[in-house]
Image (cartoon, rainbow, N blue to C red):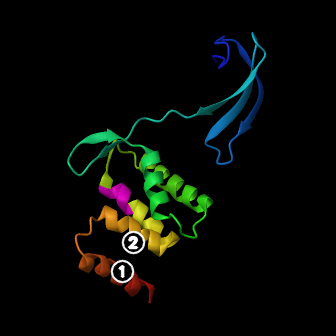
């Protein structure tokens, strides 16, 4: 592993630990040339999954975009970061476990909406208003009525 400080390719592993979620290994290393320490993470390399956009374009799946959308929907809501990360991890797992090389934005959006509906209904409506491209107040009210109907 190349040292961040001097560029030397020789280092030794001092400590290895499994991450909390078990998805990576954290390694503390010491450069054999300059003696400075740095941290690396080892993860499984995944085969890229392509997202098919509404306009037909394809791009590589980026979980950061999903996280960003969920964070915006949950902004100023009483939703813990741990709950958001759990939802993000579930969606990522769903995408990669689908076994498909391609997945539609609709499927990803539906997974986000399903998770947000259980997490926080206001965040759900916020996300739905962008995702479903509400054109007017009637569409918005219709979605709220759908939530109310299922709650009773």
Q: Kindly identify which numbered label has been placed on residue 19.
A: none
Q: Is residue 62 above or below residue 109?
A: above
Between residue 136 and residue 15, name the one nearer to us: 136
Classify the position of the N terminus by image quarter: top right
Image location (x, y in percent) of residue 150: 40, 83
In the image, what residue occupies the spot 63% across and 32% down?
A: 41
* Mark 1 surroundings: few (<14), some (14-19) or many (≥20) residues within 10 A: some
Residue 52 is one of the magenta-drawn residues: no
Q: Is residue 14 left or right of residue 21?
A: right
Residue 2, quarter of the rendered image = top right
In the image, what residue occupies the spot 62% across and 59% down?
A: 82
Q: Which residue is mark 2?
A: 125
| Residue 94 appears in the picture as rendered | no
Q: Which residue is mark 1?
A: 144
Q: Is residue 90 above or below residue 45?
A: below
Magenta span of residues? 106-110
């Amino acid at each position: 592993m190349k040292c961040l400080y001097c560029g030397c390719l020789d280092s030794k592993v001092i400590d290895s630990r499994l991450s909390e979620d078990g998805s990576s290994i954290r390694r503390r290393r010491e450069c054999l040339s300059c003696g400075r320490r740095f941290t690396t993470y080892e993860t499984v390399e995944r085969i890229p999954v392509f997202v098919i956009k509404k306009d037909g374009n394809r791009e590589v799946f980026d979980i950061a975009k999903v996280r960003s959308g969920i964070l915006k929907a949950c902004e100023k809501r009483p939703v813990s970061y741990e709950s958001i990360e759990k939802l993000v991890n579930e969606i990522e797992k769903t995408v990669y476990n689908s076994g498909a090389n391609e997945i539609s934005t609709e499927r990803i959006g539906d997974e986000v909406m399903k998770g947000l509906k259980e997490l926080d209904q206001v965040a759900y409506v916020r996300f739905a208003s962008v995702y479903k491209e509400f054109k007017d107040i009637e569409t918005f009210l219709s979605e709220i009525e759908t939530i109310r109907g299922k709650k009773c």
